[in-house]
Image (cartoon, rainbow, N blue to C red):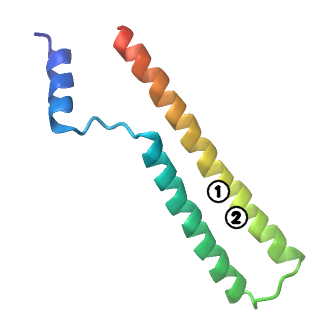
Amino acid sequence: MSKKNKNKEKKNESGENGEFTLKDYFYINLIFWAFLGVLSIVVFFSTGGKWDPVIKNVFGFIFLVFGGGFTAVSVFDLVYERIAKKNENKA
């Protein structure tokens, strides 16, 4: 038995193969978006609690750049893992 097959068996036996499921990605993103919500509330009240154009831009930045970027990277990672797993199984 080759070293590569032994490593695969060892990973499968322990149940920790390092792969995330779609459910895992969903919960990771949910936790991050909740964190951004809390962060936004803290920012809003720590800057005076007034809704003005500056706060509107800050919220846009927080949710679009951080939240959208994190979600986009998560989707990319999910797709990459699936493609890499298929290529690994072919080899």
Q: Which residue is mark 1?
A: 67
Kind of element beneath mark 2: helix
Q: Residue furthest left?
A: 1
Residues at circles 2 and 1 in contact by the CB criterion of under 8 Å: yes
Q: Is residue 23 left or right of residue 61?
A: left
Task: Please give the name of the residue rendered at 70% of the width and 61% of the height, measured from the top-left corner.
Answer: 63
Amino acid on which the number 2 mark rests in the picture: Ile
Task: Please give the name of the residue rendered at 76% of the width and 91% of the height, measured from the top-left corner.
Answer: 48
Q: Which residue is mark 2?
A: 62
Residue 23: percent from left, percent from top: 45, 46
Out of 10 and 46, give the one closest to the viewer: 10
Q: Residue furthest front?
A: 23
Out of 33 and 43, give the one closest to the viewer: 33
Q: Residue furthest bottom?
A: 48
Task: Please give the name of the residue rendered at 36% of the width and 36% of the height, measured from the top-left corner.
Answer: 19
Residue 79: percent from left, percent from top: 53, 30
The quadrant holding residue 12 is top left
Q: Is residue 8 left or right of residue 88?
A: left
